[in-house]
Image (spheres, grey):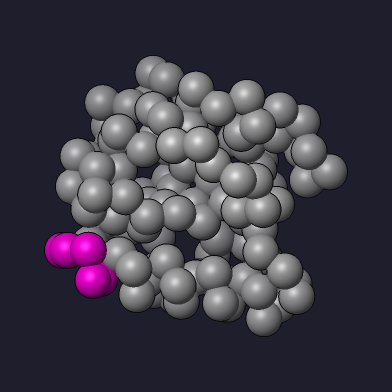
Amino acid sequence: MLIENLNPKIDITLEFKLSNYKKIPTSFGCYVISNFNFEIMYVGKASSIQLRFLNHLDSQEKLSLTPLGKAYWFSFKNCQNEYEISKLERGWLNSYSLEHGAKPIFNKINASI
């Protein structure tokens, strides 16, 4: 599934690299990590999108090669509160699961953070 198929739509997409962390807000939000072709590899939510972005950059799993390639894009949508991010994340994950019959590849990893 491509990020362009998510509803509601993504606000901003940046390369998944450390030099972009200051461009990411510290607000609530839902985000997607995708490969170079914008195929979704991970869907997540955060009370601070910027902090979660940095956490993912420290994850060997998120930086390694997968059958879909490597993580290349970090896309996000700002949200107002915890309820909104939970609802949005659940909706995006459900859309992905309906299309693919499973969660995105990185959502299958048991996170230690």
Q: In this orientation, does residue 17 appear?
A: yes
Q: Is residue 84 above or below residue 65?
A: below
Q: Residue furthest bottom?
A: 98
Q: Quadrant of residue 83?
A: bottom left
Q: Residue at x 30, y 33 (%)?
A: 51
Query: Is 43 included in the stretch rendered in magenta?
Result: no
Q: Quadrant of the C terminus?
A: top left
Q: Residue at x 46, y 76 (%)?
A: 91
Q: Main secondary structure of the magenta part?
A: helix
Q: Is residue 103 above or below residue 29?
A: below
Task: Please tell me which residue lies in front, 83 or 35.
Answer: 83
Q: Is residue 4 left or right of residue 9?
A: right
Measuring from the top left, give residue 70's x and y in whole percent.
70, 34
Q: Quadrant of residue 55?
A: top left
Q: Residue furthest right?
A: 67
The magenta region covers: 80-84
Q: Is residue 5 above or below residue 55?
A: below
Count of marks placed on residues = 0
Q: In this orientation, does residue 11 appear?
A: no
Measuring from the top left, give residue 17's x and y in whole percent.
48, 24
Q: Is residue 27 left or right of residue 41?
A: left
Q: Residue furthest top?
A: 19
Measuring from the top left, give residue 45's x and y in whole percent.
37, 55
Measuring from the top left, give residue 48's x and y in whole percent.
24, 43
Q: Is residue 50 left or right of residue 64?
A: left
Q: Residue at x 34, y 75 (%)?
A: 87
